[in-house]
Image (spheres, helix red, strand yellow):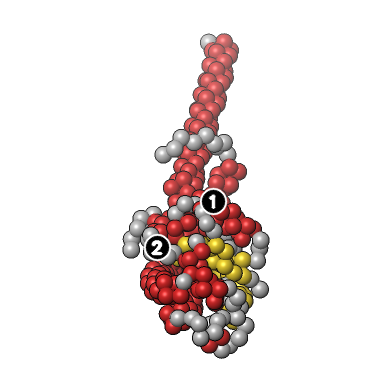
Amino acid sequence: MYKIAVLGDRESVMGFKALGLDVHSAESAAEARKILHHLARDGETAIIYLTEQYAAEMPDEIAKYKEQVMPAIILIPGKAGSLGIGMENIKDSVERAVGADIL
Amino acid sequence: MPSVQVNATRMELTKQKKRLATSSRGHKLLKDKRDELMKQFLDMVKENRALRKKVEEALMRAHGSFTVASALMGPEMMEQSLLYPKQSVELGMGFKNIMSVNVPMYDFHTKSADSGEVYPYGFATTSCELDDAVDALSGVFQDMLKLAQMEKACQLMAEEIEKTRRRVNALEYVVIPDCQAKIKSITMKLDENERNNTIRLMKVKDMMLAQQIEQRRQADAEAMAAYKEKHG
């Protein structure tokens, strides 16, 4: 059985605790990066929901895990609202596959 | 046409012909694979976009409710309420093969089937906004899981399509033309050799004929001379 982790600033991720998810809160992007690596390497976490606010600070790390089946890093809007990075990522994958954004 | 340096032998020609056949076949297969992958990928991406939009909106609504609850109850109290979850989630992961791309399939079980179990606090001291927020979050969670599955599948497929596309292009624009050029140059060389040989044989035959005619003429002349000596 695998775990589902939620990573972000405390206020954004607090509510997910009620659902029984594995919640990790980070105060800074550097801390979030550390936790992300830790989660990605433990082999038990299949999905990591990461708030876009932190995702914006570490595109390299996210790109690294893109090609691996596990973990799936999925961006969610944080408390401050959506930055559009999630949508941007979808657009990127279309561009990568087709060579141009056709949608 | 790229400049090619090959041994002009029949063996090399057979080898290149075989290579061309394999490459053409591979090119056709890979092209089919790319087209099918692309078709499935585009469908999936469209769905993925719609789902992400939906999830983001729902999450923003839940965040809004949490903010209001936090304002009404105070952040400490709220954190206390959510501190110890009643519900826990287990995630199972399987794989589905889409055109040789293994994409994960998630299915999850909550420990208790009762959806009312999601509130980990007593209702007496908490605000109803918090109930709304938790409810909204648990409502969007199914979609979040589906989003995770779909987005990962899209990422993996995008990678596979990119790889396949590169292979198709390499075969189409490099390997196959190269092979054809080599075959052409070998056939031309071999034909040239063949003509060379024929010409050489014809020439040798001419020379041999000329020699024989010369010999015959000498013999005739000698015979003529002998006859004249005897009778003349």
Mark 2 Cα-neighbour bin, 10 Å: few <14, some 14–19, many ≥20: some
Residue, far left: A103
B10 versus A8 height, above or below: above
Residue B27 visible, this angle: no
Q: Percent position (x, y) of residue B66?
A: 44, 73
Q: Which residue is mark 2?
A: A80
Q: Residue shown at 59%/57% (left/top)?
A: A35
Label 1 amino acid?
Ala
Report how far apart the C-alphas of labels 1 and 2 lie in the structure: 19 Å
Q: Which residue is mark 1?
A: A30
Q: Residue shown at 51%/54% (left/top)?
A: A28
Total numbered labels: 2
- The mark found on residue B65 in the picture is none
Q: Percent position (x, y) of residue B105?
A: 56, 73
B164 versus A45 height, above or below: above
Q: Chain of mark 2?
A: A
Foreground of the two, B50 or B80: B80
Q: Quadrant of the N terminus of chain A?
A: bottom right
Secondary structure of the residue carrying numbered label 2: loop
Q: Quadrant of the C terminus of chain A?
A: bottom left
Q: Percent position (x, y) of residue B194?
A: 51, 37
Residue A13 visible, this angle: yes
Foreground of the two, B153 or B27: B153
Q: Are marks 1 and 2 on the same chain?
A: yes
Secondary structure of the residue carrying numbered label 1: helix
Label 2 amino acid?
Ala
Q: Is residue B96 left or right of residue B134?
A: right
Mark 1 Cα-neighbour bin, 10 Å: few <14, some 14–19, many ≥20: few
Upstream in sequence: badge 1 or badge 2: 1
Q: Quadrant of residue A48?
A: bottom right
Q: Percent position (x, y) of residue A24?
A: 57, 64
